[in-house]
Image (cartoon, rainbow, N blue to C red):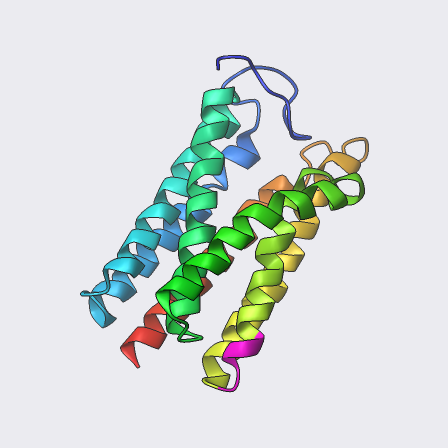
Amino acid sequence: MHEHLDHYCERLGPAFWAEPFNAITNASFIIAALVAFWIWRRKTPDDWWALALIIIVFATGTGSFLFHTFATRWALLADVIPIALFICLYLLVALRRYLQLHWVVAIAIVIGYLVLSPMVGEVWAKVIGSSAGYLPALLAIFVVGGFFYPKNPRLALWLLATGVIFGISLTFRSLDSQICASFAIGTHFLWHILNGLVLFLLLRVLIWHRAG
């Protein structure tokens, strides 16, 4: 669990600050959580699902900071677990609220997502590396946004625009290991910055939808 990992272009050794850009840009997640919390308190302070997701976004920033500083296996778990929790919980709530599906159907879809995601990631891993694991999440945003559009065009467009930003963010994550020779710090830090925006926009759509 304490073995040092070297997953990103910027890291050149085991030192705590070996990934300064990747570490510092996790502030994007913290800011996203804090601003979303401020909106939540003003608009929907009784929405506990939204609050749970906001807390998970804050934990995502904390966990990612730990991984990009300590860079060990236990820190990797602190990084990936909150991300996985956010994806699954947001998908569940979105299916219930945006598409008005029954709990049983929504839970079944989330379980299907969990089963199929690793398969999709394995198929595309040879093309875009570890970033392939996020392709199902990207697809889920567009599918939910598409079905949501007839019910609420304005918020659905925000959701779809968030998907576009997530696609750009995922591109930067994929490019990180490919450009080390020409750009030593890599592009993973841009994934952090844009993903903070993505998570904030997803939370804002959820809050706006509940606020009516």
Please count the marks in the image.
Answer: 0
Q: Quadrant of residue 152?
A: bottom left
| Residue 150 image point, x, y percent | 51, 87
- Secondary structure that dominates the magenta span: helix
| Residue 69 image point, x, y percent | 49, 25
User: Residue placed at 38% from the left, 69% from the top?
Assistant: 96
Left or right: residue 117 versus residue 148 is right
Do we see residue 2 in this rendering?
yes
User: Which residues, given as a range, are shown in magenta?
Assistant: 146-150
| Residue 49 image point, x, y percent | 29, 59
- Asked whether residue 149 is drawn in magenta, I would say yes
Outermost residue toward the left? 46
The C terminus lies in which quarter of the figure?
bottom left
Name the residue nearer the viewer: 114 or 88. 114
Residue 117, placed above or below residue 94: above
Residue 18, placed above or below residue 115: above
Name the residue nearer the viewer: 147 or 52. 147
Left or right: residue 2 versus residue 132 is left
- Asked whether residue 6 is drawn in magenta, I would say no
Residue 36, placed above or below residue 155: above
User: Residue placed at 64% from the left, 27% from the top?
Assistant: 7
| Residue 33 image point, x, y percent | 35, 52
User: Residue placed at 50% from the left, 28% from the top?
Assistant: 76
Name the residue nearer the viewer: 63 or 32. 63
User: Residue placed at 54% from the left, 54% from the top?
Assistant: 112
